[in-house]
Image (cartoon, helix red, strand yellow):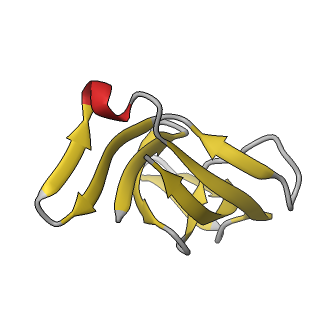
Amino acid sequence: MYAVIQTGGKQYRVSAGDEIQVETLPWEVGVALELNTVLAVFREPDQMLTGPEVANAKVVATIVAQGRGEKIKVFKFKRKKQYKRTIGHRQNFTRLKVNEIVA
């Protein structure tokens, strides 16, 4: 059984026991969450629930870690103009462990 959820403007395919890395959530490590934005639930390979069938479905997850991702270097360059800029970026993330899918 797995579900498709939406958080942080992105969609994720999750099943019980999975760990996923999502956009930063404002809670501390160890807090249990209920993610209510379930888009679809797949019970069997050929049985998909969507729309009003998953209106009261939810995914229960626990926050495992808060952190920052790998540094990405951004290099801007314009030839013949002596223009060079180098900056870096590290994206914040929250790692969730999916406990169960309630459908």
Horizontal side of 6 relative to 86 (left or right) equals left
Residue 90 in view (yes/no): no
Residue in the image at 55% along x and 75% along y: 17
Horizontal side of 8 relative to 40 (left or right) equals right
- How many marks are shown on the rendered structure? 0
Q: Is residue 85 above or below residue 14?
A: above
What percent of the width, then of the height, locates residue 41?
32, 49
Between 88 and 25, the residue placed more toward the observer is 25
Q: Is residue 17 above or below residue 66?
A: below
Residue in the image at 37% along x and 54% along y: 3
Between 97 and 86, the residue placed more toward the observer is 97
Image quadrant where residue 69 sits: bottom right
What percent of the width, then of the height, locates residue 53?
29, 32
Determine the residue located farthest toward the bottom in the rendered image: 17
Residue in the image at 11% along x and 60% along y: 46
Between 4 and 77, the residue placed more toward the observer is 4
Q: Is residue 75 above or below residue 36?
A: below
Residue 52 in view (yes/no): yes
What percent of the width, then of the height, locates residue 64?
76, 67
Horizontal side of 87 relative to 65 (left or right) equals left
What percent of the width, then of the height, locates residue 77?
46, 54
Residue in the image at 36% along x and 35% along y: 54
Location of the N terminus by quadrant is bottom left
Image quadrant where residue 26 sits: top right
